[in-house]
Image: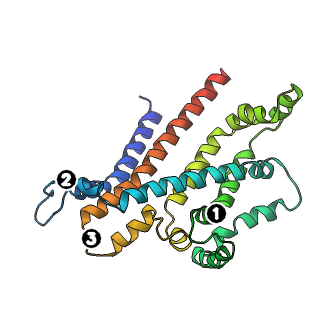
């Protein structure tokens, strides 16, 4: 093993330990009802896991969070793709002003925007329903996604599309077989960031969404805040909150690795 590979392995191991070490007590608590001093480890009795499937809050909230985050991520990528392409591949007057305006939702405190949106969405009949909640998430994450994709397209060579059109290839096939493969890695990374962002939203969902549509952050926050909830139940909820993020990150890492491997084989 070379020195560079050894150093990389050490860094990965240290990062793995630092990230997962705090999760060990959380995992232990999820399988235990009591953990009292001076016991080093709790008495494992299954904790809250056996009661999870009869809980009417956590699992429905998990499904709602997955559906909402996946839909917002897909719409953000789909709606922002061509705008990002034009921002990244073209130079025109007012380009910097457009990019700056896309950053405005990140400059202003979210609480100010959310309560302003509440009044507007009421007039548009988008308040307290699922379409309005999706639209509210897009207000924040569509500009964010567009800017990230625009940075990806700055390194994209549009000459590939020009050559395809001269050969008689249509716009749809050009996008599917030339444009998307060329920016695949950037799209994957952008989708991951967008998913994680929408996954963790609490205030926006709580204010704009339907009171009966609970996402996992909306459920977890009261569980953590109220002291009469068991540690085991809170631990299970937090694990279910973290788990999809870890799965998404691992899947994205594999997809990026496969993309790099395919690019190397293509180059050979």
As drawn, the residue found furthest toward the left would be 38
Q: Quadrant of the N terminus?
A: top left
Label 1 crowd bin: few (<14), some (14–19), many (20+), radius 10 Å: some
Give the structural element (helix, strand or loop) at label 3. Answer: loop
* Horizontal arrangement in the rendering, residue 221 relative to residue 183 (left or right): left
Location of mark 3 (residue): 229
Distance in Å between CA atoms under marks 1 and 3: 33 Å
* Horizontal arrangement in the rendering, residue 40 relative to residue 224 (left or right): left
The answer to whether the residues at label 1 and label 3 have Cβ atoms under 8 Å apart is no
Residue 109's tag is none
Label 2 crowd bin: few (<14), some (14–19), many (20+), radius 10 Å: some
Q: Nearer the viewer, mark 1 or mark 2?
A: 1
Give the structural element (helix, strand or loop) at label 2. Answer: loop
Residue 46's tag is 2
Residue 188: x percent and y percent? 59, 44
* Horizontal arrangement in the rendering, residue 144 relative to residue 234 (left or right): right
Location of mark 1 (residue): 135
Q: Is residue 119 above or below residue 24?
A: below
Residue 66: x percent and y percent? 48, 53
Mark positioned earlier in the residue sequence (1 or 3): 1
For image coordinates 39% across by 42% down, the residue present is 10
As drawn, the residue found furthest toward the top would be 268
């Amino acid at each position: 093993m070379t020195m560079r590979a050894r150093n990389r392995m050490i860094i990965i191991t240290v990062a793995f330990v630092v990230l997962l070490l705090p999760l060990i007590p959380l995992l232990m608590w999820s399988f235990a009802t009591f953990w009292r001093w001076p016991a080093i480890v709790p008495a494992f009795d299954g904790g809250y896991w056996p009661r999870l499937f009869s809980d009417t809050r956590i699992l429905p909230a998990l499904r709602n969070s997955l559906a909402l985050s996946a839909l917002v991520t897909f719409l953000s990528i789909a709606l922002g793709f061509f705008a990002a392409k034009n921002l990244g591949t073209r130079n025109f007057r007012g380009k910097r002003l457009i990019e700056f305006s896309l950053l405005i939702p990140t400059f202003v405190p979210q609480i100010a925007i959310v309560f302003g949106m509440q009044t507007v969405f009421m007039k548009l009949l988008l308040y307290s329903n699922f379409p309005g909640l999706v639209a509210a998430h897009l207000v924040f994450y569509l500009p964010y996604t567009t800017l990230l994709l625009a940075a990806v397209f700055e390194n994209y060579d549009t000459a590939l599309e020009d050559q395809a059109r001269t050969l008689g290839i249509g716009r749809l096939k050009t996008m599917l077989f030339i444009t998307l493969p060329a920016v695949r890695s950037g799209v994957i990374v952008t989708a991951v960031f967008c998913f994680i962002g929408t996954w963790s939203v609490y205030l926006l969902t709580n204010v704009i969404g339907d009171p009966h549509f609970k996402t996992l952050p909306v459920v977890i926050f009261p569980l953590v805040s109220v002291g009469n909830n068991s540690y085991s139940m809170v631990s299970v909820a937090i694990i279910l909150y973290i788990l999809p993020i870890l799965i998404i990150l691992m899947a994205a890492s594999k997809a990026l690795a496969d993309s790099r491997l395919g690019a190397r084989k293509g180059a050979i």
